[in-house]
Image (spheres, rainbow, N blue to C red):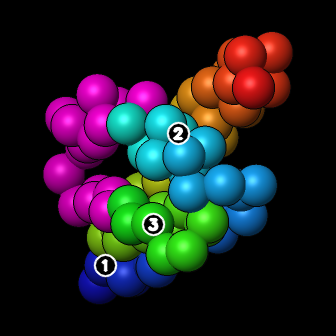
Amino acid sequence: MKQKIEIKIILECKSRTIASTIEQALKPDNVDFPDGLHMEQKIINNNLEIYFISTAMLDSLLNTIDEILAMVNMTYKTLKDVI
């Protein structure tokens, strides 16, 4: 029996522009997920909310989240130098 796991990560950003820029940076990574793994993003106020829904192996989910958070970190560091 497959277990369904849902994870919601909320990134509290200083502005909607920062949230939107991070969202755009993640779009290329929002493809080719393993079977049973899905990611959605939306901006609410200045927050970027990232939802993961998985019926895949836990390792696949954790690796995907790790990759997404690494991209968020890199994008934020780049923005910090520009803004």
Q: Relative to 69, say whether 77 is above or below.
A: above
The answer to whether residue 46 is left or right of residue 78 is: left
Across the whole image, how many numbered discs are drawn on residues?
Answer: 3
The answer to whether residue 69 is left or right of residue 36 is: right
Whether residue 77 is visible to the viewer of this picture, yes or no, is no
- Of pointers 3 and 1, the one earlier in the residue sequence: 1
Q: Residues within 10 Å of mark 3 (few under 14, many from 20)?
A: some
Give me the residue at 63% from left, 25% from top: 75
Q: Which residue is mark 1?
A: 2
Label 3 is placed on what type of residue?
Answer: Ile
In the figure, residue 14 lies in which quadrant?
A: bottom right
Towards the viewer: 33 or 18: 18
**Residue 31 among magenta residues:** yes
Q: Which residue is mark 2?
A: 22
In the figure, residue 26 lies in which quadrant?
A: top left
Q: Relative to 49, say whether 64 is above or below.
A: above
Where are the magenta residues, as a range?
25-40
Quarter of the image for the C terminus: give it.
top right
Label 2 is placed on what type of residue?
Answer: Ile
Q: Which residue is mark 3?
A: 43
Quick one: SS at disc 2? Answer: helix
Mark 3 and mark 2 in contact? Answer it, CB < 8 Å. no
Give me the residue at 39% from left, 82% from top: 3
User: Residue 35: x percent and y percent?
Assistant: 19, 51
- Of pointers 3 and 2, the one earlier in the residue sequence: 2
**Residue 46 among magenta residues:** no
Q: Residues within 10 Å of mark 2 (few under 14, many from 20)?
A: many
User: Residue 81: x percent and y percent?
Assistant: 80, 15
Quick one: SS at disc 1? Answer: loop
Mark 3–mark 2 distance (CA, rounded to whole Å) = 10 Å
